[in-house]
């Protein structure tokens, strides 16, 4: 039974280059969305006006953080290449903290 499931996944997702990094990214996104859903159920969110003076919820700030991380990584690769990509990841994490605290 388990082998059938593994074979199904192998055939279904064969078009994508699944590396451990790709799997980690998808697992992290799935985990973050699960946590955000549980937070929305057990601790209802409210709009908060931050530096931008627009109302944002946790979901809005999460979206801005993910979008910002994608932009940071693309610009980093365009400028510095992939040699020191951990720098972009650290910068994106700091950006996410700033977005969640002040936006």
Image: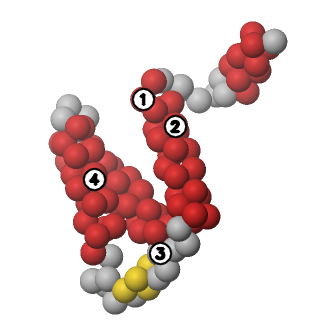
SS under mark 3 = loop
Q: How many neighbours does mark 1 have within 10 angstroms: few (below 14), some (14-19), or many (20 or more)?
A: few
For discs 4 and 2, the disc positioned in front in the rendered view: 2
Vertical arrangement, residue 6 with respect to residue 33, above or below: above
- Residue 16: horizontal and vertical position, in percent? 59, 29
At x 52%, y 52%, the residue is 35
Separation of marks 3 and 2 at Cα, in angstroms: 23 Å
Q: Which residue is mark 2?
A: 27
Q: Which residue is mark 3?
A: 57
At x 81%, y 12%, the residue is 1
SS under mark 1 = helix
Q: Which residue is mark 1?
A: 21
Name the mark on residue 92.
Answer: 4
Q: Quadrant of residue 48?
A: bottom left
Vertical arrangement, residue 18 with respect to residue 53, above or below: above
SS under mark 2 = helix
Is 34 placed left or right of 90 in the picture?
right
- Residue 67: horizontal and vertical position, in percent? 41, 60
* Mark nearer the N terminus (4 vs 2): 2
Q: Is residue 67 visible?
A: no
Quadrant where the image shows the C terminus: bottom left
């Amino acid at each position: 039974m388990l082998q059938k499931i593994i074979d199904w996944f192998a055939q279904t997702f064969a078009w994508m280059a699944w590396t451990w990094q790709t799997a980690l990214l998808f697992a992290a996104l799935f985990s973050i969305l699960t946590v955000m859903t549980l937070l929305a159920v057990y601790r209802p969110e409210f709009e908060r006006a931050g530096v931008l003076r627009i109302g944002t919820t946790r979901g809005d700030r999460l979206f801005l953080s993910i979008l910002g991380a994608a932009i940071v990584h693309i610009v980093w690769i365009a400028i510095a290449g992939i040699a020191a990509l951990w720098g972009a990841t650290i910068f994106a994490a700091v950006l996410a903290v700033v977005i969640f605290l002040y936006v």
